[in-house]
């Protein structure tokens, strides 16, 4: 005997399950409401409606927000499976069209989005004017599986099983400074001459200081009076003469307001990847944008 589901009897509301799932993952109604772009009272009513529908309490309030009840813990994995299924359905539906029109979201760092992406997008728009591009600016890795973007420009290999990537020619980063700033330093010529120089650190971990000291510099915390995780802002600080910064030489060499701080200092190579969900194979539109990025970034 073959079992057949009577779908007329199924009245489950996915919006309520999604409200429960995101609230559990975010830890509070306010954070979940922001993630789903809903009013907090609306989200709260959806969670309460699901509790009423299932006949169980899913959350209990604690001093730091919401805490899952035992029943909530038991049902959370089922909600995650439903969420994965919904995302898979959305990805499959999104990619079925062969039309070269519609929206494509590209994730890139602030520096690439500001300086390298615009001419690529201009050429793409001239070739395919019906494709609309959303630029997602983030220095963190966008979650392509959760549709935070369709395609990403990254500096690391994708590790997720459902992602594919194309490694391009390695980019090269160099040290740059404003000419007036180098004049104030009497234009040091070697790494050993930069003891009095000021640099702009790129993260709280001191990555730039460690990187440069590994290349023959002798720098300490006093050489890094500034820190900025936003590369575009860091670059404006360099242009304003606040200190020395490091950036992709395709950007630095094209800017007439700065110079290479150490002309004979070898570049620091780093990888560039164009990454997408493997369902890109179903969408001609996404493939066209992917190929345009590969070509534009030097694939």
Image: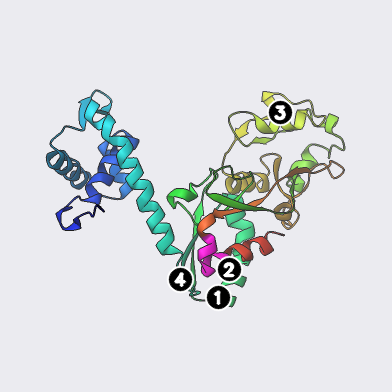
Q: Which residue is mark 4?
A: 97
CB-based contact (under 8 Å), mark 4 and mark 3? no
For the residue labelled by badge 2, is the local secondary structure a helix, a strand or a loop?
helix
Dot 4 or dot 1, earlier in sequence:
4
Residue 271 is covered by the magenta coloring: no
x, y percent for residue 129? 52, 76
Q: CA distance from mark 4 to mark 3?
A: 48 Å
Q: Look at the numbered discs 2 and 1 and tell me whether their residues touch, using CB distance below 8 Å.
A: yes
Classify 10 Å Cα crowding around label 3: few (below 14), some (14-19), many (20 and above): some
Kindly report the distance in space between the C-alpha atoms of the residues bearing marks 4 and 1: 15 Å
Secondary structure, mark 4, is loop
Foreground tag (4 vs 1): 4
In the picture of the structure, the residue carrying the numbered disc 2 is: 288
Mark 3 and mark 1 in contact (Cβ < 8 Å)? no
Q: CA distance from mark 2 to mark 3?
A: 40 Å
The percent position of residue 2, horizontal first and vertical second, equals 26, 53
Q: Tell which circle, 1 or 3, labels the residue nearer the N-terminal end.
A: 1
Question: CA gap, disc 2 to disc 1?
Answer: 9 Å
Which numbered disc covers residue 115? none
Q: For the magenta stretch, what is the residue range?
A: 280-287
**Residue nearer the viewer, 294 or 224:** 294
Asked whether disc 4 touches disc 1, contact meaning CB atoms under 8 Å apart, the reply is: no
In screen coordinates, is 22 left or right of 258? left
Q: Which residue is mark 1?
A: 128
User: Label 1 to label 3, Cα distance in Å?
Assistant: 44 Å
Q: From the viewer's side, name the closer residue of 207 and 92.
A: 92
């Amino acid at each position: 005997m073959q079992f057949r589901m009577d779908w007329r009897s199924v009245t489950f509301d996915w919006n309520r399950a999604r409200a429960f799932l995101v609230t559990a993952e975010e830890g509070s109604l306010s954070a979940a409401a922001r993630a789903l772009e809903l009013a907090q009272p609306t989200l709260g009513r959806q969670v309460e409606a699901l509790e009423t529908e299932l006949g169980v309490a899913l959350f209990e309030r604690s001093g730091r927000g919401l805490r899952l009840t035992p029943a909530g813990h038991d049902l959370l994995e089922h909600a995650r499976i439903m969420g994965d299924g919904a995302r898979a359905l959305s990805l499959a539906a999104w990619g079925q069209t062969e039309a070269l029109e519609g929206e494509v979201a590209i994730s890139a760092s602030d520096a690439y989005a500001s300086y390298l992406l615009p001419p690529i997008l201009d050429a793409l728009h001239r070739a395919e004017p019906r494709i609309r591009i959303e630029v997602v600016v983030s220095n963190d890795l966008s979650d392509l599986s959760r549709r935070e973007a369709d395609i990403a420009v990254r500096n690391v290999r994708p590790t997720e099983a459902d992602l594919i990537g194309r490694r391009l020619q390695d980019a090269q980063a160099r040290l740059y400074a404003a000419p007036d700033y180098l004049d104030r330093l009497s234009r040091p010529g070697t790494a050993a001459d930069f003891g009095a120089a000021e640099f702009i650190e790129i993260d709280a971990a001191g990555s730039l200081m460690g990187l440069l000291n590994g290349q023959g510099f002798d720098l300490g915390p006093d050489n890094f009076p500034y820190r900025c995780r936003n590369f575009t802002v860091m670059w404006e600080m360099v242009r304003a003469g606040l200190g020395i910064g490091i950036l992709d030489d395709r950007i630095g060499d094209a800017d007439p307001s700065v110079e290479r701080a150490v002309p004979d200092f070898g570049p620091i190579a780093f990888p560039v990847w164009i990454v997408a969900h493997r369902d890109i194979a179903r969408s001609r539109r996404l493939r066209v944008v992917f190929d345009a990025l590969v070509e534009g970034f030097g694939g």
